Image (tube, helix red, strand yellow):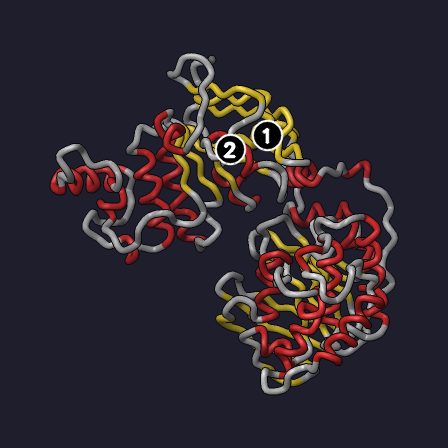
Amino acid sequence: MQEDIVLTMRGICKYFPGVKALKNVDFTLRKGTIHALMGENGAGKSTLIKVLTGVYPMDEGEIRIDGIEGAVSIHSPQEAQSCGISTVYQEITLCPNLTVAENMFIGRSGKLGVDWKTMEKRSGELLESLGIPARPRQQLGSCSLAVQQMVAIARAVDTDCKVLILDEPTSSLDDKEVEMLFRLMRDLKDRGVGIIFVTHFLEQVYAVSDQITVLRNGELVGEYEVKELPQVQLVEKMIGKDLEDLSTIRKSDASAAGNEPFYEAQGLSSTESRPFDFHIAKGEVNGFTGLLGSGRSESVRAIFGADPVTGGTVRIDGKSAKVTKPLDAMKHGIGYLPEDRKRDGIIADLSVRDNIILALQVIRGMNHPISRAKAEAFADEYIKALDIKTASSETPIKSLSGGNQQKVILARWLLTHPQYLILDEPTRGIDVGTKTEIQKLVLKLAEEGMSITFISSEIEEMLRTCSRLIVMRDRNIVGELKGDELTQERVMHTIAGGGD
């Protein structure tokens, strides 16, 4: 092992039933470097980290760590920590009701119990040496999220950490807090710690990282020096499209540029999204595009009121409107198919029929129940209209395929006859035939006058369905494309910040 290498992973494979999640992945981490691990959703980043930290056993490959003879076998996070590998996750895993010092030393007391004086002294020294603005006796919950992250990092560093994994540490931080965290990362880098930085924020990668490893579909795309990889090329490698290989894609004719706006927002923000302006015309199909984590889903959740709205003004059909929760949106004729259908869409144990009538029943209120006969008629109508493959309307929705579950959620909203329908990843994880059906349905509904916002990780799909694209990066709108601008090349350049 070379002197400056702290971690080597070679030929890592991980299998799940029917899926090869990692296929011969190599990864090398050097001392005193910040190494970004990049890839779209499902690329294998989380699986690789879980193999390294002992959450998952690897099926093939080897791991070597500086200072330890031979390949190591890591079977648990505790074993990983004993090898000098520490992880700080996106969600704070410390105890907010305890003090900073208690959190830094929790689970590390000696055989004679807690030496409070030594614990607080050591905590104070570590906080000061790392420039963390917190006091040992301060309750952790009184600290900002950024400081809580930094305390978690300090705890990791104090356990003889050689490899520090930061998994989406900036997702809940504002710009000032991010820079505070970056200062700490640079300090640890100068001390020789190797840092694996997992993030979806491109600008942050280029602000703090030295090297980038890109994964795609469980395979290694390559390892690169940051200074030698322009942002647009990084986007290409993550998505798997080369600019010179882009094919001509048929544009949607569903443009509604001359129509009156149905929905308009100014300065709209939520607890999960930054302020943004947005509008959609009647009969228009537009979309939010950007890499995973860019803020596209958070933006449409703000429109629907799925996350608490914190600011902005909204007009619907030319009139001022208040939409702070989903029921408000539904009563104004807005429907929303969420990104995660299993978590936020279907109610697994209910029947297909009950899942279809759910939104309409909510709008009507529990004092006006839908009769069994009407419910069955509604369900049968949409099962036929959308060609939902199910034994009957009584079948539990959890028994259906992913594509048919998605059709049931579409049926749920179509039954309410919405004027504006938001579709977040409506074709993810379903077969090609069903994808095509849904795309055709979107264009048909738009021709009939419905406004539709469409989100997909597949740029080709966005270009086939949308007449206008709002491009997002790092939770901000960075461009709007329409007409002749709707090409993969232009989309990818805009996502990457216009790099060469």
452 in relation to 456, above or below: below
Say if mark 2 contacts mark 1, CB within 8 Å. yes
**Residue shown at 80% from the left, 61% from the top:** 388
Report the amino acid beneath label 1.
Answer: Lys
- Would you say residue 405 is visible in this rendering? yes
Tell me the SS state at disc 2. loop
Distance, label 2 to label 1, CA atoms, is 8 Å
Q: Quick one: 319 or 72, which is closer to the camera? A: 72
**Is residue 14 shown left or right of residue 163?**
right
218 in relation to 301, above or below: above
Q: How crowded is mark 1: few (under 14 residues within 10 Å), some or many (20 or more)?
A: many
- Would you say residue 315 is visible in this rendering? no
Badge number at residue 352: none
Which residue corresponds to mark 2? 56
**Is residue 295 shown left or right of residue 354?**
left
Q: How crowded is mark 2: few (under 14 residues within 10 Å), some or many (20 or more)?
A: some
Tell me the SS state at disc 1. strand
Which residue corresponds to mark 1? 14
**Is residue 396 shown left or right of residue 136?**
right
Residue 485 location, x and y as percent?
79, 54
Quadrant (top left, top right, bottom left, bottom right) of the C terminus = top right
103 in relation to 471, above or below: above
Quadrant for residue 364, please give it: bottom right
Residue 195 location, x and y as percent?
44, 32
Sequence-wise, the earlier of marks 2 and 1 is 1
Residue 397 location, x and y as percent?
68, 60
Report the amino acid beneath label 2.
Answer: Tyr
**Residue shown at 41% from the left, 27% from the top:** 32
Residue 455 location, x and y as percent?
70, 57
**Residue shown at 80% from the left, 66% from the top:** 383
